Image (spheres, grey):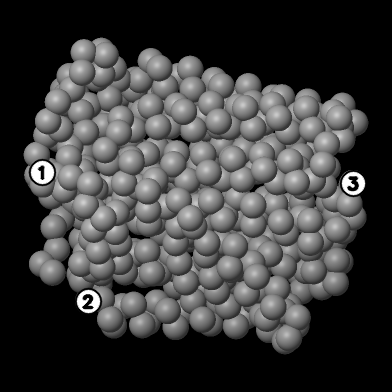
Amino acid sequence: MEPIADETAVSEDQARDISPPVETTHTSTSALQFLDFRLLFSGVGLATFGQQMLSVAIGWELYIQTKSALVLGGVGLAQVIPLIILFLPAGYIADRVNRKYIVLVAQLVNVLASLSLALLSYLHGPLVLIYCCLAAIGGAQSFSQPANSALVSQVIPEAAYENAMTWRSSINQLSAVIGPAAGGFLIGFFQGATPVYLLSSGFFLTFAILLIFIHVQPQKRALGEGRKLSSLVSGVRFLGQTKVMLAAITLDLFAVLFGGSVALLPIYATGILHVGPVGLGWLQAADSIGGIAMALFLARRPPFKRAGPVLLLGVAGFGLATIVFGLSHWFWLSFLALIFIGAFDNISVVIRSTLALVRTPDEMRGRVSAVNSLFIGTSNQLGGFESGLTAQLLGPVAAVVAGGIGTLLVVLIVAGAFPDIRRLTTLRETPQE
């Protein structure tokens, strides 16, 4: 889609941060050939790694101090509440303010919050202040996620969007594997979580420094929007009108909601597979291993030519692998099923993320990314709750198998309700809606 209008004015200070349009041919599809994307990619990887280490540290420390599962539940709640409250203004601001500066300020907030957690850890500070730090991190992520996602389109040409989303997915999956392991190792080595918070703040600060050296192309802004209240919800309205993107987000949302087998891994490791804590660690890493493998495969292949059918088959494969995991009583089969769950899920992530970049005008990318972040973020939290509630009522095996069957039913419903998704070829093709 063509942008409506260029941003009306760019200050001299902003001009120094904006590079000329990237000179490339339409056959250039590798995002890593562009220096600005490599800087952004590296910063995202470091910040995600730091976030994963911090999550392990805060969970370990709070449980050691309180022995309360409710306190642990509050960790996720403290971070998701700002996302729910702020997603509309965060998306609006990401479309009106220089996105690079939004991400930079968010990283500085993360630095301050991590240093505060380190101080509270050292002084054994009160729980309420710890939750305040977590809420600050959640608020920073509310603004950073939509701006960060949209920023990709300002450092590479459109032909490289799909490849860029694949590489970003791979670094997120890699951080999900290595980050928790590194955090746990450092906690054991230093006999405390304080150094982990300090190291995480260093990663956030490094990302902020890298952002200074990234040159971005000018943002676009729709004329006539002004400060109308309706512009806050235009991202939601745009998704409702863009059937292919709505179908992709719906598939991903309900797959995460119903296929929450990861939330029940401790039950499977102890009561069904009988593999203990070491086996649990391998099970928790399995889906990320599959995600990394799929991301590396997709990064080296040409762009999708039948993206819609591939997306539907990928989510269906996710559901089938979930059913296999639910029924398995053999560790290696369960481990393999989780690898396939991560691999199939990554197909959905890449296609959905690329669609959000390609099909959204630049002047609305922040708001659409904010809505997308809200749906996926809350579905992760609700998916874990749904799996736990179903397991409590029906047992873990029935809960996981029912989730897999639910995912397959969602695929059938979406394929029937959104015929455009079945006909989708390349991700850059404009559908007839």
Left or right, 388 with reference to 217: right
Alpha carbons under labels 3 and 1: distance apart: 54 Å
SS at circle 3 = helix
- Amino acid at dot 2: Pro
- Give the percent coordinates (x, y) of residue 12: 21, 13
Q: Amino acid at mark 3?
A: Gln
Between circles 2 and 3, the one closer to the viewer is 3
* Residue 112 visible in the current orientation: yes
**What is the spatial separation of the Cα atoms under label 2 and label 1, in whole angstroms?**
33 Å
Q: Which quadrant would the C terminus be assigned to in this image?
A: bottom left
Label 2 SS: helix
Name the side, left or right, on which 391 lies relative to 290: right
Q: Is residue 359 above or below residue 157?
A: below
**x and y, in percent, of residue 157 in the image:** 21, 33
Q: Quadrant of residue 429?
A: bottom left
Asked where in the image residue 56 lies, by quadrant, the reply is top right
Label 2 crowding class (10 Å Cα cut-off): few <14, some 14-19, many 20+?
some
Which residue is at the front of the view, 63 or 270? 63
Give the class, few, some or many, for how many residues have Cα within 10 Å of label 1's Cα (few <14, many ≥20).
few
Circle 2/circle 1 CB separation < 8 Å: no
The residue carrying mark 1 is 223
Give me the residue at 14% from left, 26% from top.
Answer: 9
Label whose residue precedes the other's in the sequence (2 or 3): 3
Q: Nearer the viewer, residue 341 or 259?
A: 259
Residue 341 left/right relative to 169: right
Numbered tag placed on residue 65 in the rendering: 3
Residue 419 circle label: 2
Q: How many marks?
A: 3
Between the C-alphas of marks 2 and 3, the distance is 53 Å
Q: Which is in the foreground here, disc 2 or disc 1?
A: 1
Task: Say whether residue 11 is left or right of residue 296.
Answer: left
At which x and y percent is residue 166?
40, 43
